[in-house]
Image (cartoon, rainbow, N blue to C red):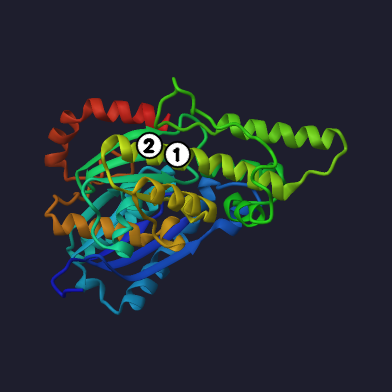
Amino acid sequence: MAADEPLVLGIETSCDETGVGIVRGTTLLADAVASSVDTHARFGGVVPEIASRAHLEAMVPTIERALKEAGVSARDLDGIAVTSGPGLAGALLVGVSAAKAYAYALGKPLYGVNHLASHICVDQLEHGPLPEPTMALLVSGGHSSLLLAPDITADVRPLGATIDDAAGEAFDKIARVLNLGFPGGPVIDRLAKEGDPKSISFPRGLTGPRDAPYDFSFSGLKTSVARWIEAKRAAGEEVPVRDVAASFQEAVVDVLTRKAVRACKDEGVDHLMIGGGVAANSRLRALAQERCERAGIRLRVPRPKLCTDNGAMVAALGAEMVARNRLPSDLELSADSSLPVTEPHVPGAAHAHAHAHSHDHVHEISKDNLYS
């Protein structure tokens, strides 16, 4: 870690985690998180208004905790980065407003960055600089995407995405059907270890020869699992929860890893990065490692804490923006709940007009593909 590497604070509030991270270059100094997940659990999912209020209450204490953990002063910072999209509009606004206030008060450059690009960039904190291009599989409660990133600060290309439910969303819904609570990912992962993944044959969506090779669909799988469970209950039979969890999980990770490895081969990329909250799933990690080794592909997956939403990932991308002399955002920066992944960051207004004009067609295509 060199003293001349950029020292950046990152703020993440796209959903229910108030994350504040501080990095110097590619070295993580602090990763403070305040979660409101327990508050949402009784509702069976994230309630946007509750998330926004929780961010408001947690913001200043979490920033102060991160600065203390990193052993730096706010005035030492070289920049402040914040998730400006995609995500829940109200939650994003809390983070963006806080970042603008700190940037203005401290006289520091502000970088509005993309949530998905941040999930890719966080791997630099674990495994060093990203290869160029980087192939990334991002899987979370809101996204399932295959992305090719020749330059994480300026050039991220969507190859495929979910056309309905995201992988993490499917985990939550099946957990609800099984009365396992929220969030569903961790408990299904835990129960699946005690079940037989071959006991029930659940469908693998979009894996036919005529299907889009890199797109994902988990809605049909979710419906199939739910109907199987309902049929067991209607017949008065006990539902084998562990076997259902294992078989469902296997169907999800089989499709995710199969398509990711295929994309690497097709694009001639010899490595794969996996990020997002579902990347913490133990079976996804194991099957990805197995298939990557067989295909001669190097697998990069951050430790589980860096896979879920956090401020460190935002700080990592912000530091990369500073290091590459990317134009900062201005104080008119706003939240964009559907910010396309093709825009890794939101530059200042003077540059943004030309930038937006030149990427109008990409913006429309990516919105249709990724966020519809």
Pointer 2 residue: 262
Q: Is residue 339 visible?
A: no
Query: Which quarter of the picture shows residue 101?
Result: bottom left
Q: Which mark is residue 34?
A: none
**How far is mark 2 from mark 1, CA to CA?**
6 Å
Compared with residue 112, is residue 59 higher up or lower down, i.e. above or below? below
Residue found 35% across the figure and 71% down from its top: 30
Q: Position of residue 348 (x, y in %)?
A: 16, 45
The residue shown at (19%, 44%) is 154
Secondary structure of the residue carrying tag 2 is: helix
Query: Quadrant where the C terminus lies?
Result: top left
Q: Amino acid at mark 2?
A: Arg
User: Which numbered circle lies on residue 258?
Assistant: 1
Give the residue type that dot 1 points to. Answer: Arg
Residue 102 vs 158, above or below: the answer is below
Image coordinates of residue 291 in percent, x first then y, are 44, 47
Query: Would residue 243 be seen by someone viewing this image from the given angle?
Result: yes
Name the side, left or right, on which 169 lies relative to 317.
right
Question: Which residue is rendered at x = 39% and y = 53% of the image?
Answer: 94
Would you say the residues marked 2 and 1 are in contact, meaning their CB atoms lie under 8 Å apart? yes
Q: Identify the secondary structure beneath mark 1.
A: helix
Q: What residue do we see at 16% from left, 74% from top?
A: 2
In the image, is 283 to the left or to the right of 190?
left
* Residue 174: quarter of image: top right
Judge the density around disc 1: few (<14), some (14-19), many (≥20) Cα neighbours within 10 Å. some
Q: Residue furthest right?
A: 236
